[in-house]
Image (cartoon, helix red, strand yellow):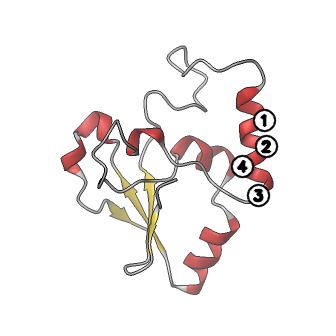
Amino acid sequence: MPPVADPETGEIRLLEDRCTTCVLNPAASVVPLPPGRRQQFIRDVRDCGGQIVCHSTMPPVVPEDFPAAMCRGFIDAYGLPEAVQEAVELGVGHIVEVPDPTRTGADAYGGGVQQ
């Protein structure tokens, strides 16, 4: 998986809104998955204390060098992973909300909104 954080700047990227094809979106446009796959995937990610990288911030949707971001749908539903919370609390990381490149174009990333 591509990194969602930059250790040099402390930037931890989070999509500012759910992408239109979020795997966690109950809308009809959601990506079709085999029965039970979504629930198992979420359990696996949560069990290891991880997070989901938004597929709209990964190739081939965006260029290889585009910075990846955490899935807004996952974070809204389950909260920030403990490691991210600790990085923010310790002052070694900060959340930066980035626009959905499928709505704004991959070249629109300009650092987002810091929290």
Residue found at x 25% / y 54%: 109
Q: Amino acid at mark 1?
A: Gln
Q: Amino acid at mark 4?
A: Val
Crowding at label 1, few (<14), some or many (≥20) Cα neighbours within 10 Å?
A: few
Sooner in the amino-acid sequence: mark 3 or mark 1: 1
- Circle 4/circle 3 CB separation < 8 Å: yes
Q: CA distance from mark 3 to mark 1?
A: 13 Å
Q: CA distance from mark 4 to mark 3?
A: 6 Å
Residue 10 percent coordinates (x, y): 43, 77
Residue 27 percent coordinates (x, y): 55, 19
Residue found at x 34% / y 36%: 61
Q: For the C terminus, give its image quadrant.
A: bottom left
Crowding at label 3, few (<14), some or many (≥20) Cα neighbours within 10 Å?
A: few
- Circle 2/circle 4 CB separation < 8 Å: yes
SS under mark 4: helix
Sooner in the amino-acid sequence: mark 1 or mark 4: 1
Q: Which residue is mark 4?
A: 45
Q: Nearer the viewer, residue 88 or 44?
A: 44
Residue 89 percent coordinates (x, y): 60, 80
The quarter holding residue 8 reads: bottom left
Residue found at x 56% / y 41%: 73
Left or right of 8 in this view: 107: left
- Which numbered dot is residue 40? 1
Q: Which residue is mark 2?
A: 43
Q: Which residue is mark 3?
A: 48
